[in-house]
Image (cartoon, rainbow, N blue to C red):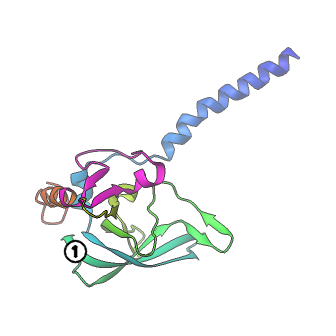
């Protein structure tokens, strides 16, 4: 009987030792807000017009494509009135749901501010640069300044990703001012100088 308790105890200790390594493996390396801004190909404020999730890729996974109507360009080549499509891992197809924590999700009609980048797979598909740190959901209440809430706060109810100069919940005007200020430190190719 004592041997069984020792084996169970050792198994639990072994699992506990693995948890921090597994948790670390799923975390993103913290980078500065300036690096996120400078590495993005553009920053837009706009409305999510359409959201579609499908099985894609090899191996197949559920990916979501969201069409964003650009209402304001904070940085980069995107112009008001233009439509851009971003692709992110996760979504629901039929009875299957794939949740990719810290990757942004989209709702039709949602107003967002997003740093835009391209996937590194050679397709040219756009994505939200910086994962959950690169997208803010905008909320408006009569008589109050519009607020931008970073995606990880919406997902977890608290900031779980790196906090640098841009607070996870910030006034939209303050967020735009901070992003424009950080953009002034970007080199000719977009990288931070």
Q: Nearer the viewer, residue 177 or 124?
A: 177
Q: Which residue in the structure is indicated by mark 1?
A: 72
The N terminus appears in which quarter of the rendering?
top right
Residue at 54 percent across and 65 percent down: it is: 90
Q: Can residue 75 be seen at all in this image of the molecule?
A: no
Q: In the image, is 137 to the left or to the right of 44?
A: right
Query: Looking at the rendering, which quadrant does residue 104 occupy?
Result: bottom left
Q: In the image, is 96 to the left or to the right of 144?
A: right
Q: Can residue 140 be seen at all in this image of the molecule?
A: yes
Q: In the image, is 186 to the left or to the right of 84?
A: left
**Magenta span has 17?**
no
- How crowded pointer 1 is (Cα within 10 Å; few <14, some 14-19, many 20+) is rated as some
Residue at 27 percent across and 70 percent down: it is: 45
**Magenta span has 172?**
yes
Dot 1 falls on a residue whose secondary structure is strand
Residue at 25 percent across and 77 percent down: it is: 71
| Residue at the extreme top of the image, as rendered | 2
Q: In the image, is 21 to the left or to the right of 170?
A: right
Locate residue 110, reporting x and y percent: 39, 70
The C terminus appears in which quarter of the rendering?
bottom left
Query: Looking at the rendering, which quadrant does residue 179 occupy?
Result: bottom left
The relative height of residue 167 versus residue 181 in the rendered view (above or below) is above
Q: Nearer the viewer, residue 156 or 34?
A: 156
Residue at 27 percent across and 56 percent down: it is: 36
Locate residue 62, reporting x and y percent: 57, 70
Query: Looking at the rendering, which quadrant does residue 148 occupy?
Result: bottom left
Residue range of the region highlighted in magenta in the rendering: 145-174
Locate residue 174, reporting x and y percent: 18, 56
| Residue at the extreme right of the image, as rendered | 1
Q: How many marks?
A: 1
């Amino acid at each position: 009987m004592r041997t069984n308790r020792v084996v169970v105890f050792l198994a639990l200790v072994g699992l506990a030792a693995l948890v921090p390594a597994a948790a670390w493996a799923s975390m993103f390396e913290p980078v500065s807000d300036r690096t996120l801004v400078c590495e993005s190909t553009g920053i837009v404020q706009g409305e999510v017009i359409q959201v579609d999730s499908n099985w894609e890729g090899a191996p197949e996974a559920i990916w979501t494509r969201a069409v964003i109507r650009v209402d304001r360009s904070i940085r980069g080549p995107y112009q008001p009135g233009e439509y851009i499509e971003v692709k992110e891992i996760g979504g629901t197809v039929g009875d299957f749901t794939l949740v990719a924590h810290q990757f942004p999700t989209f709702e039709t009609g949602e107003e967002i501010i997003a740093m835009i980048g391209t996937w590194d797979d050679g397709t040219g598909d756009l994505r939200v640069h910086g994962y959950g740190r690169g997208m803010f959901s905008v909320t408006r209440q009569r008589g109050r300044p519009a607020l931008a809430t970073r995606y990880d706060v919406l997902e977890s109810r608290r900031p779980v990703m790196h906090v640098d100069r841009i607070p996870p919940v910030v006034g939209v005007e303050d967020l735009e001012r901070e992003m424009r200020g950080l953009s002034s430190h970007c080199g000719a190719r977009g990288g931070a100088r």
